[in-house]
Amino acid sequence: MAPRPSDGPTDRRLHVLFLTFHCPRPDEPGAVRPWAEACLLRDLGCSVTVITSAMHYMTGRDLRKGGRGWCSESEQDGIRFLRVWGLMNYRKSLVRRLVHYALFAALSFLAALIRMKRRPDVVLVGTDPILVCPVAWALAGRFRARLVLDERDLYPETALALGVLKPGLLSRGLSAFQRALRRRAAFVLCATPGILRALQTLEVPDEKLGLLYNADPELLPDPGIRPADSTRRRLPESPWGEARFRIIYAGSMGRASDLGTLLDAAAKIGPDPGVVFLLAGDGEYAASYRTRAEKESLPVRFTGPLPRQEARSLIREADLGLLLFSEAPLFRTALPSKIFDYLGLGCPIVFLGSGDTEAVLRESGGGLRLPSGDADALARLLLELEREPERCQAMGRAGRAWFERSVGGEGGRAILRRALALEKAE
C-alpha cells in the first residue's frame, strides 16, 4: 500500500516515523548510518520523527534534557527526536543489555502512541535490536502505514555467529519471525551487498530490496583536503605527536574487529618514534588492548570515543587507515561505515579480511588487502608504505574519486524514494 499524505491541515509532507536504537549526531561518537538516513529523508522533503534511546550506546551518557522524564523531545536540523529512558551502563552484562532493549521497545511503542504530533505515513525501523521489530510491525498496522525495514545486520544469523545465541528453539523462532516480518514489509533497505544477497537467497522479492551503503552523504561537500606532500603543520595538542607515518583505526573495539593482530604488528615494528598507531573508538575489549599496549610499550595511542567530526579530522591527518576482521564467514558480508569515511576523506586503507570490503577496495583502488590475522605481513606492508608516501597518496585519491562516483550523488536518495514509494504518493 502506498503511503498517503498526512491528515494534518497544514503540513502535507510525508511523515516518517523512524525507530532506531541509536542515532548519534555529528558532534557525538558512533555509527553514521541512522543520522545519514534521517538527513536523507529530510532532504527528500519528508517530515521526520526519530524515536531513539536516551542512553548513548557508546558513552552511556544520558541525552535527555536535564536527565529527567521517560521521554524527552528536541529538534535538530529539521528532525524531531523523541529520546526514551533506559538503563545506565547497560553493556555491563547480557541480562542488563536485554532488559535495556526491552525497555527501549516498550517505551518506543508508548512514545509513538502518545507523543506523536502527526500520524505517520511510513514506519522505518532499524532491525537491531530485534526486540523493536514487533513494535514497528504493530505501529505500522495501528497507523495503517507503510513498513520499511533497515537491515543493518542479519538476525539471528549474526547473534549465532558471534556466540551470543545458541542454535535451538529460540533461534528457530527468531528466524521464523524475521521471515514473516520481511513478508509484511513493503521494502527492505540492505546495508551491504552481502545482506542483499542473503535476503535474495531467502526469497525476498528483488523489487522489495535496495542497497543503501553505510556512507555519509555529508562527506561529499567536503573537498577531502589531503596534503600535497608529507609536510604538515603539527599542533602541540595533536595525538600524533611528531610521527612521520600516521596509522589510524577508527571504530568499535569489540568482537568484530581483530585489533589483536594490529597490536601484534605494532610489536613487530617496535618502538619506532616515526610510526604511530592511533586507535579512535571504544568497545568491550578496549581496556584490555590499552593494558597490553602500555605493558609492552607499543607505539599505539588511544583517544577513546570521539565525535564523528573529531574522528574525521584525525582521518584526514592520517597517512593510512586500518580495518581488520577475523576470517569468520559472518564478516565476509560486513561493510562498516568506517570504510566509507576512509574512502570519502581520501585516506588509503589496508584491510585484513575478505568478502564485500575486499571487493570495494579492489573496485575503488583505494587500498590493499591482506589475509586475516597475518601480523607479519601487516608489519612488512606498513614499513613498505611508510617508505612510499606517493603510493599511499595515489590510493587515497583513487578512493575519494570512487566515493564521489559510486556512493554519492543521487544513489541513496533514489533508493529511499523507492522505499517510501514517493512516486506513487505524488
Image (cartoon, helix red, strand yellow):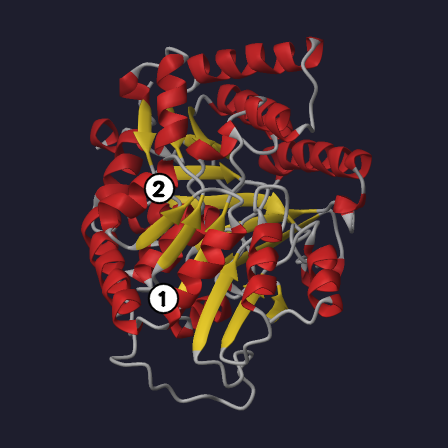
Rate crowding at label 1 as few (under 14), some (14 to 19) or many (20 or more) other CA atoms within 10 Å: some
Q: Picture quarter containing residue 198? A: top left
Q: Amino acid type of disc 1?
A: Leu
Residue 71 x/y as whole percent: 68, 48
Question: How many marks do you count on the picture?
Answer: 2
In the picture, measured across the screen, residue 120 lies left or right of residue 116, that is left
Q: Do we see residue 95 in this rendering?
A: yes
In the picture, measured across the screen, residue 166 lies left or right of residue 219, that is right
Mark 1 — residue?
Answer: 385
Vertical relation: 69 (above or below) 379: above
Residue 123 x/y as whole percent: 46, 31
Mark 2 — residue?
Answer: 358
Q: Picture quarter containing residue 425? A: top left
For the residue pair 283 and 149, the one nearer the viewer reads as 283
Q: Residue at x 22, y 26 (%)?
A: 424
Q: Amino acid type of disc 2?
A: Glu
Q: Residue at x 39, y 71 (%)?
A: 386
Determine the secondary structure under disc 2: helix
